[in-house]
């Protein structure tokens, strides 16, 4: 016996799906379908409506996000929530600019959504850039059953010459090696030193391994040259996994820490969510060594917390407002192509310990 088709064709939607796409209630939808003269079809005892009409006549004509120009870059005050509209809808038409950290935060936010979501895209350079680096293909692969991409007239991709490595998805340990090798070759071709390439490769390998081992999730990474005049590289990397506080507190030794304490403590040497007998917990401290020795900076977000470590002009370590509050961990690491000074783990730890005392000021457990 032949199985009945679920719907007349992919472009037809039920009333329930239409309400979900538009983010409105059933009574409001009944008003809208009369107001906008929506075509309907009765099939298998249900009413069906054309997705194309819903988007063209209602969705794309609705006011955009409250913030008309959202800059998802580390230096701005913009948040992923600024492009999120009612009905769990992300309106990319408000995006003005984006950097590797913004790419990672936006992707992880969408992947970690618990409910069905929709994405509205336009023909802006930001959207075309996201398409060219593989953002939408990765999103659809991870959330094909949940994400509905609404496309107004769209001409294709825009290649930003500062992008040195497109979005890479690492799904197994060691899976980043080929991408790192290609990146290092690209760096050399563009005149960057082998020393910088080695450090960049080590950082990506360490953080990708952490995402897979501790976060229990795919790791995403993208690398960009900060601008034409400087010799700085920005590494965006993240996952939608368990998050640093959760994984660290799996070790009973750290279970009593607040989430803020856990996020900062995890960068100290020999601190790990695994037991001491495994002798782990050196990798994140070594990243601090690299940052200090290069006078670089880093931003790390995990779940609802964000920490910025800036070593460009002295030592500045403090909590900041996160770009997104989704599950998992997101990094931005910026290094410059210049000599790296050798820094010991104990020296790196001293900076972290000083920050711990200053931030928490001997307070009792913080929430």
Image (cartoon, grey):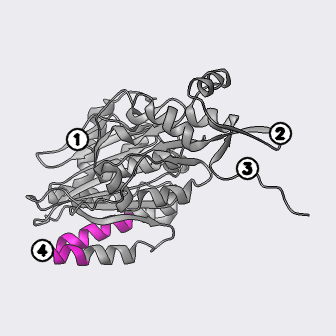
| Residue 138 image position (x, y, % from top left) | 48, 60
Q: Which residue is mark 1?
A: 75
The alpha-carbon separation of the residues under discs 4 and 3 comes to: 56 Å
Mark number for residue 359? none
Give the residues drawn in magenta, as a range.
185-206
Of mark 4 and mark 2, the one earlier in the sequence is: 2
Mark number for residue 191? 4
Residue 198 lies in the magenta stretch: yes
Asked which secondary structure carries label 2, the reply is loop
Asked if the residue under mark 3 is in contact with the one under mark 1, i.e. CB atoms within 8 Å, the reply is no
Residue 116 appears left or right of 15: left
Compared to 1, does 120 lie above or below?
above
Of mark 4 and mark 3, the one earlier in the sequence is: 3
Residue 128 appears left or right of 139: left
The alpha-carbon separation of the residues under discs 3 and 2 comes to: 11 Å
Q: In this rendering, does residue 271 appear at all?
A: yes
Residue 11 appears left or right of 352: right
Q: In this rendering, does residue 256 appear at all?
A: no
Query: Crowdedness of circle 3 by 10 Å Cα count: few (<14), some, many (20+)?
Result: some
Residue 51 lies in the magenta stretch: no
Q: Which residue is mark 3?
A: 7
Pick the residue in front: 131 or 32: 32
On-image quarter of the N terminus:
bottom right
Of mark 1 and mark 3, the one earlier in the sequence is: 3
């Amino acid at each position: 016996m032949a199985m009945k088709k679920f719907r007349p064709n992919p472009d037809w939607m039920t009333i329930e799906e239409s309400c979900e796409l538009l983010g409105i209630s059933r009574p409001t939808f009944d008003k809208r379908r009369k107001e906008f003269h929506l075509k309907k079809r009765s099939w298998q005892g249900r009413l069906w409506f054309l997705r194309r009409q819903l988007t063209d006549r209602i969705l794309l004509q609705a006011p955009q996000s409250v913030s008309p120009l959202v800059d998802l870059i580390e230096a701005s005050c913009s948040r992923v929530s600024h492009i999120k509209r009612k009905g769990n809808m992300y309106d990319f038409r408000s995006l003005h600019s984006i950097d590797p950290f913004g790419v990672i935060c936006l992707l992880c936010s969408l992947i970690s959504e618990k409910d069905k979501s929709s994405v509205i895209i336009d023909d802006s350079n930001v959207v075309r850039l996201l398409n060219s680096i593989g953002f939408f293909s990765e999103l659809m692969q991870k959330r094909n059953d949940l994400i509905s991409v609404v496309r107004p007239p769209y001409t294709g991709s825009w290649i930003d010459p500062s992008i040195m490595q497109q979005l890479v998805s690492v799904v197994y340990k060691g899976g980043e090696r080929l991408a790192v090798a290609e990146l290092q070759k690209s760096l050399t071709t563009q005149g960057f030193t082998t020393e910088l390439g080695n450090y960049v490769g080590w950082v990506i390998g360490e953080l990708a391994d952490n995402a897979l081992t501790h976060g229990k999730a795919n790791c995403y990474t993208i690398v960009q040259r900060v601008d034409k005049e400087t010799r700085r590289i920005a590494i965006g990397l993240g996952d939608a996994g368990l998050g640093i506080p959760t994984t660290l507190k799996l070790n009973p030794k750290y279970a009593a820490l607040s989430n803020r304490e856990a996020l900062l403590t995890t960068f100290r040497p020999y601190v790990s969510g695994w037991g001491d007998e495994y002798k782990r917990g050196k990798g994140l401290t070594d990243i601090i060594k690299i940052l200090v020795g290069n006078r670089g900076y880093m931003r790390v977000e995990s779940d609802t917390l964000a920490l910025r470590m800036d070593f460009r002009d002295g030592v500045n370590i403090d909590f900041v407002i996160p770009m997104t509050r989704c599950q998992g961990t997101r990094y931005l690491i910026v290094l410059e192509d210049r000599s790296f000074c050798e820094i010991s783990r104990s020296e790196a730890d001293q900076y972290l310990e000083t920050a711990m005392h200053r931030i928490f000021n001997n307070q009792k457990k913080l929430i």
